[in-house]
Image (cartoon, rainbow, N blue to C red):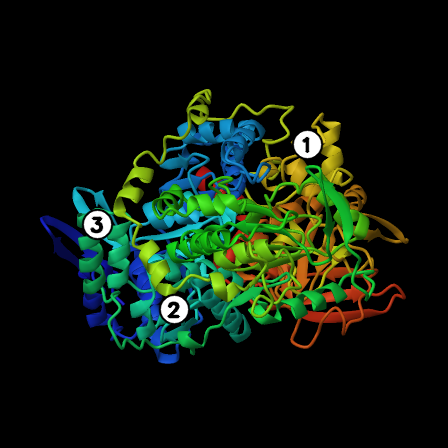
Amino acid sequence: MSSTLREASKDTLQVLDKTYHYYSLPQAAARLGDIQRLPKSLKVLLENLLRWEDGDSVTGQDIQGLVDWLKQAHADREIAYRPARVLMQDFTGVPAVVDLAAMREAVKRLGGDVAKVNPLSPVDLVIDHSVTVDRFGNEQAFEQNVQLEMERNHERYVFLRWGQQAFSRFRVVPPGTGICHQVNLEYLGKTVWSEEQQGEWIAYPDTLVGTDSHTTMINGLGVLGWGVGGIEAEAAMLGQPVSMLIPDVVGFKLTGKLREGITATDLVLTVTQMLRKHGVVGKFVEFYGDGLDSLPLADRATIANMSPEYGATCGFFPVDNVTLDYLRLSGRSEEQVALVEAYSKAQGLWRHPGDEPVFTSTLALDMGDVEASLAGPKRPQDRVALGDVPAAFSASTELELNKPQQPREPVAYTLDGQQYQLPEGAVAIAAITSCTNTSNPSVLMAAGLLAKNAVERGLMRQPWVKASLAPGSKVVSDYLAKAGLTPYLDELGFNLVGYGCTTCIGNSGPLPEPIEQAIRDGDLTVGAVLSGNRNFEGRIHPLVKTNWLASPPLVVAYALAGNMNINLTRDPLGKDRAGNPVYLKDIWPSGAEIAQAVAQVSTAMFSKEYAEVFEGTPEWQAIEVESADTYGWQQDSTYIRLTPFFEQMGAEPEPVNDIHGARLLAMLGDSVTTDHISPAGSIKADSPAGRYLQEHGVERQDFNSYGSRRGNHEVMMRGTFANIRIRNEMVPGVEGGMTRLLPGNDVVAIYDAAMHYQQQGTPLAVVAGKEYGSGSSRDWAAKGPRLLGVRVVIAESFERIHRSNLIGMGILPLEFPQGVTRKTLKLTGEETLDIRGLNALQPGAAVPVTITFPDGRQEVVDCRCRIDTATELTYYQNDGILHYVIRNMLN
């Protein structure tokens, strides 16, 4: 293959009165072979390879390899993908900027040029994860929560303001604006990117990686993007391509239309369940079929958003007229809309009726078959039909440790001078929250209309329900107000509490103290109902054991019912003023009513709210920082500390040492999430992290959350494996981050055990079941274990992002052979492990692991190396991806 393929495919495109240069896929196909039926998502990758062909990182063989994918709908080939931009939120963005600042220190110490540590791609960081629902249920809640956010996070925000001026091509969207994925969808995303290069305007697909797994939401706009760990994103920022295998692509065919009363949330929960069952981890999913003609862009974004929940790398929707309509509605210029249409059609990226690309495998869904659903009690893929929720709740309580079979009796409590009874199954939290649904006018208008109908019938929220409304952008407040629905939501306690992730990320804030006390006194199992995408154990609130994902109107309905044991398909929500029962069907708005309300959404709303998106409040603007290339680290800071990752690093990598006599730090089951490994929510006072903060003069009410303290490695390593619901099989019957200190039977905090082993020079291992590391793209789930001394993780299977994060931190991921598990091996955690030959490691190779049992018996298990590509192996051999990047800069 000639190395001039890139030049040979260059063409021009006239759009309105402007000429764009681009790399033409049809022209390349004349030499590569027919690509017409290549999935649209792979055409975006193909253009990326074509545009970056350099004969080194991207070769003609790589480009041909992607075209040859069509022969078997599969290809075992590593490619180097370079996204156009990077998106961050603050929980992952702060530690990423800490890493960049620490890299500058390392480069300076090793005699390099600190200015080289600078983004080469545009980076947008949206502060959306820090606002907590401390105040709720009144008109002052929003202002009070924002004020508390600014006070608590002042140190972090000073640091981000420093990053804003220290790094070029780095923009920060201030707090109180919206959720990064919704801001991306409504404003930042372009579908087709263009920039001036050497006097020519070049057009190419808008692509990105993001430090939040829900980056995939932008796939609804025809933009290829997905979540990566912060460490991978930093490497991408600094010019390092994303190393990946050409993916399998699963086609998901949508036909028909949703029935009356069925929402986009019900659809996405159905799609999530189907795709999880099919198995799409590490694969692309691409939606096709004529059902897309009637699927609004907001619904597409809802489905794309939950890609990480169904396990796929992305959930891609091709460009069509629906895309153009949304771009116009959200205030993109006519020039941009014209470019998107012309470019997509020229490149074969446009969706035509009847398109049937070649896929690795396919699924199909008639949207007319979707029924009203929730997902719970602890996994997004566990869909439950609305009428089956009481039975699912009852089944979930039976799985609890040390839980009696009989339901608990209600507990009396007093709130605001009134006496109440808190029942088992009470809905303690009802939150309209998260990017998944708050980007979707139809489900938000449905919630507002249901609230209106409820108030007019005299229904009220149950007194123990903490209700909240946290939209993903200010546009939501505008259209709810325009439709006249805000007063009804307020009446039921769904007052605005902030523009941010809030409850979905675990920032649900405390429940009223009498209610928390009643839950503790009665050991009650209560529920949270939220319009979010994550309901993992221990995530939403420490005292709320079951968490249920639902559409915004169902969130309002459960606030009225107040109990998970009520069957909303047949039991009344409450009584009207005349004492007559009122059922959900009586107050559910019609499709025509919802459509009429959605018609109130206007371009002017988007234009108004995004006109000054980077400005921020007067408090944000008042933050002053010193202008300096390196950061002025504060020794007494409990938020921002210089990370130790590069302290021992030399200009050349050391040989990889074999692992001898490794002890097990934890032995874990299936579906262990990154929330289990590195929680984002509240910090317990009697935990190692809580004790550290108190020793450093931080009062309990000022702990903030693990997520907000990710710029401090001391807190985060103490919080590793500290989720209150994690179950380490080395200590049966115990919940929380505990382990056995070996040899012996002492049960201690995992952090304390790790420090003991570190003093002895003992390497550590973690053993787990299937889907290890599912959930968020949380780099601290790899950084934390690294700082605790974990050298290897052996699991039955890994979730995509976490596997690459482990490699990025120099931790070896190994997979048990088929049919072999910790259970078949009868592991207790008392064993030691030896792994040799690590200096001769190869991607995907068999790695012999010698297990020495307590009685001296030995067994060798050939595990599969889950370092999948040669580039990943290079990162591992350099002790991590950022170490490799630093050494590259020095050379």
Q: Residue furthest front?
A: 578
Q: The residue under label 1 is which amino acid type?
A: Gln
- Residue 292: x %, y % from top left: 32, 69
Q: Earlier in the sequence, mark 3 or mark 1?
A: 3
SS under mark 1 = helix
Nearer to me, 470 or 46:
470
Q: Earlier in the sequence, mark 2 or mark 1?
A: 2
- Residue 772: x %, y % from top left: 63, 61
* Residue placed under numbered mark 3 in the picture: 336
Task: Identify which residue is drawn at 42% across, 64% down.
Answer: 315
Q: Say whether marks 3 and 2 touch (CB < 8 Å).
A: no
Q: The residue under label 3 is which amino acid type?
A: Gln
- Residue 324: x %, y % from top left: 24, 57
Q: Is residue 549 above or below residue 810?
A: below
* Residue placed under numbered mark 2 in the picture: 286
Tell me the quarter of the picture where residue 357 sits: bottom left
From where the camera sits, is residue 311 visible?
no
Is residue 50 left or right of 560 when viewed as pictured? left
Q: Is residue 70 above or below residue 6?
A: below
Q: Quadrant of the N terminus?
A: bottom left
SS under mark 2 = strand
Distance (Cα) linking label 3 and label 2: 24 Å
Distance (Cα) linking label 3 and label 1: 48 Å
Q: The residue under label 2 is which amino acid type?
A: Glu
Viewer-nearest of discs 2 and 1: 1
Q: Quadrant of the C terminus?
A: top left
Viewer-nearest of discs 3 and 1: 1
Q: Say whether marks 3 and 1 touch (CB < 8 Å).
A: no
* Residue placed under numbered mark 1 in the picture: 701
- Residue 165: x %, y % from top left: 40, 27
